Image: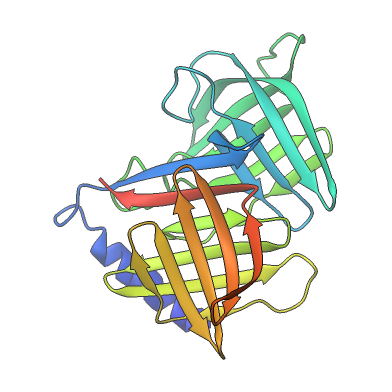
């Protein structure tokens, strides 16, 4: 498995060479009464966390402080809290973006923050997505799941999903939040907003209805399950 991931990474890096591509565009969304843009989000074994995109901004780095909502899903529980996002502090390849509870003064040494990479970043044509390392919030510090060079990464209430795409090679990986083994499927197809894989008579369908996304499992024409994503990111060529 490790060798296969290395091969996928090497193929993706080669495909993303600045001499052959103009780089990628990364879009992130969270589910708050429907899908809406996310500035950052984080998939962890314990919970999923996400921050709404401040109005009027197009990027995650924040030069000023703006009101946002912090969402957390942990097991069957969820919460939405008012926060302030920013400013961002860059240094030594890292970007720390302050998270301050609404109504509190923003500190120069913030207690809570989002830690992301200033190197492994979608602004560099070599990378398909920005690496979000961790969220530090009142519940603790949570390291974020990350798979290099993914075309899609998302979390439902039950699963964590990654899709790699290099040329006509479309690969699916899932992990289950209950600790049971997930799936690793190659030989998928991608047409428009639809990804599909088949395995032992089952079809796994990922649909990106901009901006919402769903994961369905079918047997023949019968839909066995359909899950909405709590948060996800998708990367496409510019």
In the image, is residue 99 above or below residue 116?
A: above
Q: Position of residue 216 (x, y in %)?
A: 58, 66
The residue lying furthest to the front in this view is 221
Q: How is the image coloured?
A: rainbow
* Label total for image: 0
Q: Residue at x 31, y 63 (%)?
A: 13
Q: Residue at x 58, y 31 (%)?
A: 96
The foreground one among 139 and 49 is 49
In the image, is residue 199 above or below residue 119?
A: below
The foreground one among 85 and 77 is 77
Q: Residue at x 31, y 71 (%)?
A: 11
The residue lying furthest to the bottom in this view is 200
Q: Position of residue 79 (x, y in %)?
A: 80, 35
Answer with the quarter of the image where residue 68 lies: top right
Horizontal side of residue 237 vs 197, given as left or right: left
Q: Position of residue 201 (x, y in %)?
A: 56, 89
The foreground one among 124 and 199 is 199
In the image, is residue 102 above or below residue 5?
A: above
Horizontal side of residue 52 vs 23, given as left or right: right
Q: Position of residue 9 (x, y in %)?
A: 39, 69
Q: Quadrant of the C terminus?
A: top left
The foreground one among 168 and 112 is 168
Q: Residue at x 58, y 14 (%)?
A: 65
In the image, is residue 42 above or below residue 214?
A: above
């Amino acid at each position: 498995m490790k060798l296969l991931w290395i091969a996928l990474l090497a193929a993706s890096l080669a495909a993303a060479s600045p001499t052959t591509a103009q780089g990628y565009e990364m879009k992130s969304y969270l589910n708050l009464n429907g899908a809406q843009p996310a500035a950052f989000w984080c998939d962890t074994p314990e919970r999923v966390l996400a921050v709404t995109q401040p109005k009027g901004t197009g990027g995650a780095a924040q030069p000023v402080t703006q009101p946002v909502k912090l969402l957390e899903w942990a097991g069957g529980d969820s919460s939405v809290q008012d926060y302030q996002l920013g400013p961002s502090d860059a240094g030594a390849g890292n970007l720390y973006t302050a998270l301050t509870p609404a109504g509190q003064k923003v500190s120069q040494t913030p207690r809570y923050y989002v830690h992301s990479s200033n190197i492994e970043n979608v602004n560099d044509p070599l990378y398909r997505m920005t690496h979000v390392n961790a969220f530090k919030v009142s519940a603790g510090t949570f390291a974020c799941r990350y798979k290099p060079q993914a075309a899609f990464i998302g979390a439902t209430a039950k699963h964590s999903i990654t899709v790699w795409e290099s040329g006509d090679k479309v690969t699916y990986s899932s992990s289950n939040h209950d600790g049971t083994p997930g799936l690793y499927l190659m030989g998928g197809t991608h047409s428009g907003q639809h990804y599909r894989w088949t395995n032992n008579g089952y079809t796994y369908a990922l649909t990106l209805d901009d901006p919402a996304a769903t994961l369905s499992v079918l047997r023949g024409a019968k839909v066995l399950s359909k899950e909405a994503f709590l948060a996800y990111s998708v990367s496409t060529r510019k």
